[in-house]
Amino acid sequence: MPLSSSVVVRQWDYYSFELDTEMEFSVIVNETRAQGGSDCDLYIRKDALPDNWHFDHRESSLDANFALKVTEAEAGI
């Protein structure tokens, strides 16, 4: 399910999706940012909105392009 979006600095954008059965999935981020701009972090949480302290999975490196692979995800995430 490809998606293209923009995020304002220090803003959270939320997306939801459902899994039919327990499975493995990846979220791939290809970030473009202005020189000296902030990086993008990815947080995933089942059945609730994530934040900096409450999440099931996260990718918070300084890499502009990354993939977050979730193994043994529960149905419904």
Image (cartoon, rainbow, N blue to C red):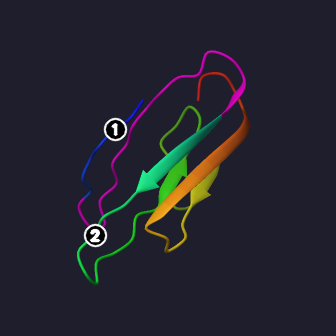
Using the image as rendered, state which of residue 20 and residue 28 is in the foreground: 28
Viewport quadrant of the C terminus: top right
Using the image as rendered, state which of residue 64 and residue 49 is in the foreground: 64
Residue located beneath label 2 in the image: 33
Query: SS for tag 2?
Result: loop
Q: Which residues are magenta?
A: 8-24
Name which of mark 1 and mark 2 comes first in the sequence.
1
Task: Give the residue at x 44% y 53%.
Answer: 29
Q: Which class describes the residues within 10 Å of circle 2: few (<14), some (14-19), or many (20+)?
A: few
Say whether residue 64 is visible.
yes
Residue 3 badge: 1
Residue 74, x across and y down, in percent? 70, 28
Q: Is residue 7 left or right of residue 28?
A: left
Using the image as rendered, state which of residue 59 and residue 14 is in the foreground: 59
Q: What amino acid is at disc 2?
A: Arg
Residue 46, x across and y down, in percent? 59, 35
Q: What amino acid is at disc 1?
A: Leu
Residue 36, x across and y down, in percent? 28, 84
Say whether residue 55 is visible.
no
Task: Give the residue at x 34% y 75%.
Answer: 38
Task: Give the residue at x 42% y 29%.
Answer: 1
Q: CA distance from mark 1 to mark 2?
A: 17 Å
Q: Is residue 9 left or right of residue 15?
A: left
Inspect the magenta stretch and tell me whether residue 10 lies in it. Answer: yes
